Amino acid sequence: MGTPDKSSTSMGRQQQADLPNRPDEWKIEQGLLGASLPILDQSAPEPRYVKPMEYKPRAYRPRENQAAIDSVGDRDKLFADEREGWAGYVEWEAYPDKKAAAHKILEAHDAKFQMGPIPGQNPVLEGVRWKQWHTAVGGGLTKFPDLSWEIVQKEKHKDMLHLLQFPYNGEPPKRLVTAAEITPNPLHFVRNHGGIPHIAKDKYSLQLDGLVKFPHTFTLDDLMDEARFPRMEKMVTLQCSGTRRIEQINLYAGEGDEMINAPWAEGAIGTANYFGISLKKVIKACGGLVDGGKHLEFYGADTYFKKNNVMNYLVSVPWSKVKANEVMLAWEMNGEPLPKIHGYPLRVIVMGYIGARSVKWLYRIKAIDTPSLAPVQSQEYLYFNQQVGKHNQLMTSGIQIQEMPVSSAIMSPWTKQIVIHNGAIHCKGWAYSGGGRWPERVELSADGGFSWYAVAQDALSHKKKFAWRTWEIDLPCDVEGWIEIVCRCWDNSLNTQPLNVRAAWNWGLHVTSSAHRISIYSVNKTREITARRLQDFDDRGVSFAPLTVPTEWPIQSMDDYVKYFKLHGPRDAENEYDPKDLAED
Ligand SMILES: Nc1nc2c(c(=O)[nH]1)N[C@H]1C(S)=C(S)[C@@H](COP(=O)(O)O)O[C@H]1N2
Ligand SMILES: [Mo]
């Protein structure tokens, strides 16, 4: 882990000039290490340079201010699991005192971001800070990081990309994202904000309160009683609003581009058949809403940390969404009980909204009069204007993200890949639109977005409200060398995607919905010279990749070279001389 150098200082012009070059100076000068670059402050008559915080590796000190921590009392008792059979569930929302005690402990620690470039390993990021926070608070949270990782290994596919080990954030590798229209459970992406609670089915209950006529607590058997609640099954695509964030990170630094937010690729989206009941019926069973109840706040049993505060995972959706039977309480995913990592025994599925509203390990629903004030709703998942950033950000300057706009992605080929083909490049991918809209047309361009080919209707998976469509196409491509393939979708409302990342770039690095662009190196084997050259590589048993390695043998014979110029004339056009002029010289 790293810790900031608190002595972050400003320097005058002379001091800056005196700084010795660092070994990585050229990278800094070329913008490849933006985080190390001094700020140039030109706001005063004399410009000045301000050093950024430096993160130096430092061992974690579990007890920083022991006196403050001790004053809180016995952590194991204070922060014990709330209920029998609910491992890893600490109730925070009902106990302001408990929150205050945990806050005091966290204030007495110095757990800091793990800054630096994204490392090339799997798990990619460890989540050092989060582990430290859990250890610091102790009690029921102590074992969370280890338990959660065990569950990941049991429930998820061995080839998942573990973007963040704890809280666990993972997505399938590109080749498996669209391997099937329905994502197998072990390959479905996971986005956790805390540990994975382990709740025994027979000890489970759901509390419904707030602005409902008859507050009531339901057991799982109550909810599964078909005589009371008709069941529903629905194919739903869940998409995290962070999907494809890596493209925004690669363009410009934004909030938490290094650690807070997972560097998602195109796989933070998945589709499953969910089975359960409509929340509307449960609200009705409580006599409906009263006294201006307009929103339903969902409580997840996991623990979330933010700015040295602890809380359960809380968000809300408007009643209108529930009323439309578009909010489900689900206990089955693709014909199996919900996996623990996906919210066992009961989760919310909000169709057509970002994944964040589909609360896992649901233990309480409270009817309220405004959208939830909890941090996940009010401070996160905000979509800012481009000019909003660290210098001026307000919670209210962001739009709360609910429905994802239309989007799409190419899952094959991969960017920077050499593709050898016979005049058409086979491409595969997904397309999705939020809010109950669906992809109507998917188009690909092999020329950077000037001309577009539509995917044939029978090469798109079925049209469904609330689900993605997977697709494939043989994209005509005569051109060779570096080309840019672009994919865009039109939904049933004829919405489409901005054409480049910058057009929708935002400080929170959410909703990367621009047309997906990949650069590939096109090698068209229907061209004679190309076919011969490839044969040449084959005959010699030499790999054509990496592209950058120069070809080691003569690429043309000198005989051919001389013959060519005999046939086509020399390099320069001949002047037609008058023999008289020549004589004068
Ligand atoms: N209790 C709880 N529910 C949660 C979360 C969480 O961290 N805790 N993450 C949310 C987010 S941001 C997303 S994108 C989806 C992901 O669902 P999945 O992990 O089942 O794919 O769960 C949502 N529900
Ligand atoms: Mo998410």
Image: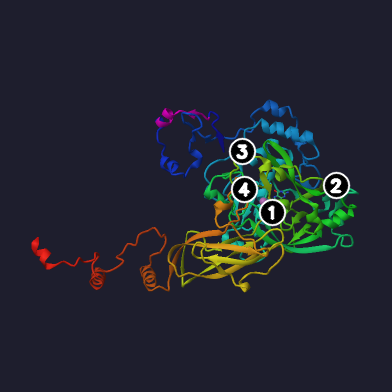
In the image, residue 9 lies in the stretch drawn in magenta? yes
Helix or strand or loop: what does disc 2 sit on? loop
**Compared to 89, does 355 lie above or below?**
below
Label 2, label 4: how many angstroms apart (C-alpha)? 42 Å
- Tell me which residue sits at (81%, 48%) in the image: 364
Image quadrant where one finds the N terminus: top right
Kindly identify which numbered label has been placed on residue 165.
4
Helix or strand or loop: what does disc 1 sit on? loop
Along the polypeptide, which appears first: circle 1 or circle 4?
4
**Compared to 166, does 15 lie above or below?**
above
Q: Are marks 4 and 3 in contact (CB under 8 Å)?
A: no
In the image, what residue type sits under mark 3?
A: Asn
User: Which residues, given as a range, are shown in magenta?
Assistant: 8-17
Along the polypeptide, which appears first: circle 1 or circle 3?
1
Along the polypeptide, which appears first: circle 4 or circle 3?
4
Q: Which residue is mark 1?
A: 354
Is residue 65 rendered to the left or right of residue 544? right
Indicate which label's residue lies in the foreground, 1 or 2: 2
> Quick check: is the Cβ at mark 1 less than 8 Å away from ligand 2?
yes
Q: Is residue 213 visible?
A: yes
Label 1, label 3: how many angstroms apart (C-alpha)? 26 Å
Q: Quadrant of residue 89?
A: top right
Helix or strand or loop: what does disc 4 sit on? loop
Q: Which residue is mark 2?
A: 292
Q: Which residue is mark 3?
A: 392
Helix or strand or loop: what does disc 3 sit on? loop
Q: Which percent across, then down, holds residue 374? A: 74, 42
Q: Residues within 10 Å of mark 4 (few under 14, many from 20)?
A: many
In the image, what residue type sits under mark 1?
A: Ile
Q: Which percent across, then down, holds residue 29? A: 43, 41
- Tell me which residue sits at (85%, 49%) in the image: 208
